[in-house]
Amino acid sequence: MPYVRAHMDPQPTDPNDPARPPVTDHRRRPAYLRCARVKLCSVKKCLQVIGSSERGRDPQIYTRFSPPQLNKPSAPMADSEPDPVLVGEKRGCPEDEEEGTLTKKPRVEKDQENGGPPHHREEDETTGEASDGEEEVETFADMMKHGLTELDVGILKYVSDHEGFSGILKERYSDFVVNEISKQGKIVHLDDLSVPPEAEEVPEVEPQPEDSDVLTEEQKKQLGELQLFKNKEDNVSIEVIDDTKEKRTVVHKAIKTQYPGLETKTEEREGRKFIVAYHAAGKKALAAPRKHFWPKNRGTFCHFVLYKENKDTMDAINVLSKFLRLRPNMFSYMGTKDKRAITVQEIAVLKITAERLSHLNKCLINLKLGNFSYKNHPLKLGELQGNHFTVIIRNISGTDEQVQQALTSLKQTGFVNYYGMQRFGTTAVPTHHVGRAILKDNWKEVVDLILKPRPGAEKEFLVRCREEWAKTQDPEAALKKLPNKRCVEGQLLRGLSMYGKKNIVTAFGMIPRNNRLMYIHSYQSAVWNTMVSRRIEAFGLKAVEGDLVLKGTAAHVLSAAEAEACSIHDIVMPLPGFDVIYPSHPVGKGYRELLSADGLDIDNMRHNVKDYSLAGAYRRIIIRPSEVTWEIVQYDDPKISLVHSDFEKLENKPAPVFNKEGKYRALRMEFSLPPSTYATMAIREVLKLDTSIKKQTQLNTTWFN
């Protein structure tokens, strides 16, 4: 029987257990939080279905995959890189929970953010609610029926015809391990926590002032303390006895030369003149001593390997920023990684020493830093060659022959390179619908789609905000309903409040650029998925006349003779835009029909706002993973980790031991994928599953009955 099972902590789950924590302030919770067995914390980041739980060292989530009939995917989903769809409970380092992060305000409704007890008494749920005037409790399946399925975003086809089989993905977050592949093609590992020795620097001969004794020993001591941040005063004042411009110039020059990082100015106090030494950055320099005393023969950026468990990349960066008292944009990286996983990636930070970073290992939880080096360049998004995945699928039902067939097909042929479900959002308003409205220049619809009330599950403050907007159309009133104004809705409302409802384009610009572009890229992705499914339906897995291949960075239309010499792995399909060409066969013409049906002109993809002009791109339709290996292991204890992580190796912890006669069977698979490729889609191909939350919920409903 398909099921999902998750827990936040090892509290009792029996509703009649007197040890259960009481439910407080019950009437203020929305209907979806009063569901007897379900608590929704954040649909995008956290799916918690309260059922039986097991004790273990890490939060667990169980997803049972059942094999559907061929080409009829119907099973729960898997997480993928770069953006997880279904992740575990939002629980990070203690410092995060106590102090928040630089990009998040303290949580207001803690019971909705996993801070409160996740268990509810069934008898409590059915009493005392009539007078509250709230509607009847909606089941989780009812809430999620408004979501998307793979069919809605064009994900239809499989490459192979093998029979799918069931299994449990991410029973532990350690069952999903992602190692970045650097631009040099090396799999990134954390294997060295030592600090690199400092290179000896040849001191430069600095020009000295003519009079090297213009500063007294006491003044030199005060200036030295100020330079090293030992002086709690904001400045050091030196009285000029012989008040001449030449004398003052010598003192100014002596201070700046002998104490780099200090600035000076002349002040007159009660008829006397003083030279005042201070830090150019003022008090902010205390938080950023890296700006001074950086050896010229040392690389400007400290590169290091970040190992993290059950934490997404931006959360990890925010934690490091908090400890180092830096802005998050001082860090650079090549890609974001899954939250519910163990991930290893390279990070660079401007003018922070390896020693300071190494000290953080003493206080960080679920994060580890190592493999330090100094370089003269930051990292750039997309520079990586890809990611290497180690995935454990527990309790598999497939026979050895079924597993062999599925993984052999993945290794030899690959999978359809669809954009995963996480690309399109998890609420009743898909992101690609917003993108379509932007491209149509229909800004009223853009605001409506983002702010209007929507069916399904959402946080209570968002529900109140949407209701206020629908009732009053007053951005300031709706904004007051949000405890955190940094969400997309809050940023849009703030823009509307500042610039007015007649200047929506400027108001929409208050949303960060990457978030705004996400909408139109989502629309491109939906079009691409749909057209690739049509292409495979029409021509199968072979190159045909009219297909596109890349020659350098330009696309080339294949002739019949050229198609004979090409493989399906060479074929690309375009994301719509003004700088791409389309296949010359009938499927290519379908692009025009599809965009026309959406009210868009394929010949005019330039937008009035430059940011929203789509140049287009090309993407391979079939991806064949590299370095594919697999094995079936057996074990007895469901709580043990089946992967030997980098950190466990550094701690000299023993590798997992498998029992050939164990009562549980698991599939351990490893593979590497290029950037912007979804591991979800590779696992979908192996297990023959539907990755949408809506489909999962429909399948899992039977577990509650």
Image (cartoon, helix red, strand yellow):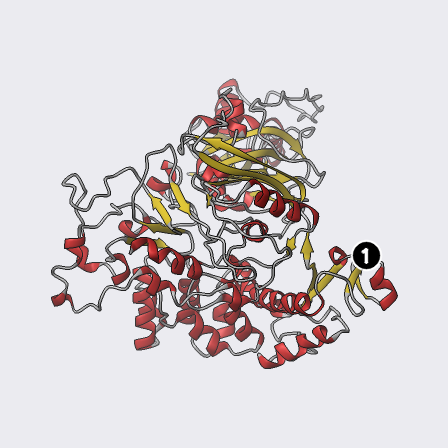
Residue 126 coordinates in the image, percent (x, y)? 15, 59
Residue 121 coordinates in the image, percent (x, y)? 18, 50
Q: Is residue 478 left or right of residue 444?
A: left
Instruction: Name the kind of residue labelled 1 in the image.
Output: Gly
Quadrant of the snapshot with the C terminus = bottom left
Q: Residue at x 72, y 76 (%)?
A: 586
Residue 696 coordinates in the image, percent (x, y)? 42, 57
- As helix, strand or loop, the secondary structure at mark 1 comes to loop
Would you name the residue on which mark 1 appears? Answer: 552
Q: Is residue 557 left or right of residue 188?
A: right
Q: Is residue 138 left or right of residue 183?
A: left
> Is 405 situated above or below 474?
above
How dense is the environment of label 1, judged by Cα within 10 Å: few (below 14), some, or many (20 and up)?
few
Task: Determine if residue 674 is in view.
Answer: no
**Location of residue 256 by image quarter:** top right
Q: Residue at x 29, y 66 (%)?
A: 464
Foreground of the two, 292 or 603: 603
**Location of residue 543 by image quarter:** bottom right
Q: How many circles with numbers are drawn on the protein?
A: 1
Residue 143 coordinates in the image, percent (x, y)? 34, 64
Foreground of the two, 477 or 646: 646
